Amino acid sequence: MVKKVEKKVKKVVKKATTFNKGSRSPNLKEKEEESSGGMGLDDAFGDDEGVEYAESKPRKEKKKKKGEEDEELEEELDGELDEIERGVGTLSSENTKPVQVKMSKPVSKVKKGDIVRIDGKPYEVDGHFMLIDHKTTKEMAIEVFDKDDRTFQIRYFDDQVEATLELYELQEIMFVKRVMTTLEW
């Protein structure tokens, strides 16, 4: 087998280095560079009929128990959730009371530059816009900021303003729900 391959290699190398004696090709260096890298697999093993190669070994897969994977993921998520809850505080529908609203004009008339008071603190309105159009109702947001340039959103549905009011604070890249008890404008 090895001798056969060696003969083929010599034959291919000889073929690649010979050229017509009468002509000097300007691409001779290119041909030499191409042939100096050896021959292709098709050329080297083109005549391997009747040769039997050893079978490849079966692949061994590491098996992790499904329970172990789930437990690791659950522990990691619980740790992250605990960290978030410490920073934000737990918010559930049980400990949130309906927001007391005191309106001097309809909510649709609140615009940029207006002042709203959330739990007695003044906030300036930065914008009033629609988040999502749900065909029958629209989810709206009033974006406000305080003197420390912290950004908040007052979200509500336009057909049930007082029942659906929620306050969100922008923290880094996401809005986190906050508790508010009174809102006035």
Image: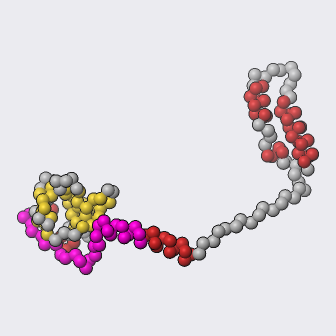
Q: Identify which residue is drawn at 46% across, 73% down.
A: 74
Q: Horizontally, is 177 left or right of 36 in the view?
A: left
Q: Identify which residue is drawn at 19% across, 57% down.
A: 144
Image quadrant holding the C terminus, namely bottom left
Depth check, front residue: 176 or 135: 176
Is residue 130 placed above or below 15 in the rendered structure?
Answer: below
Q: Horizontally, is 101 left or right of 6 in the view?
A: left
Depth check, front residue: 21 or 44: 44
Q: Identify which residue is drawn at 89% across, 56% down.
A: 51
Most distant residue in the left direction: 104
Depth check, front residue: 123 or 126: 123
Is residue 133 placed above or below 113 in the rendered structure?
Answer: below
- Residue 97 magenta-drawn? yes
Which quarter of the figure has residue 67? Answer: bottom right
Q: Position of residue 181 (x, y in %)?
A: 16, 71
Q: Position of residue 169 (x, y in %)?
A: 25, 61
Most distant residue in the bottom direction: 94
Q: Identify which residue is drawn at 90% across, 48% down.
A: 2
Q: Visible in this render: residue 139? A: no
Color style of the picture? secondary structure
Which quarter of the figure has residue 161? Answer: bottom left
Q: Position of residue 160 (x, y in %)?
A: 19, 72
Which quarter of the figure has residue 58? Answer: bottom right
Depth check, front residue: 102 or 110: 102
Q: What stretch is highlighted in magenta?
A: 78-106
- Residue 98 magenta-drawn? yes
Q: Where is residue 114 in the image (x, y as percent from the top left)?
A: 12, 56
Q: Visible in this render: residue 56? A: yes
Most distant residue in the right direction: 3
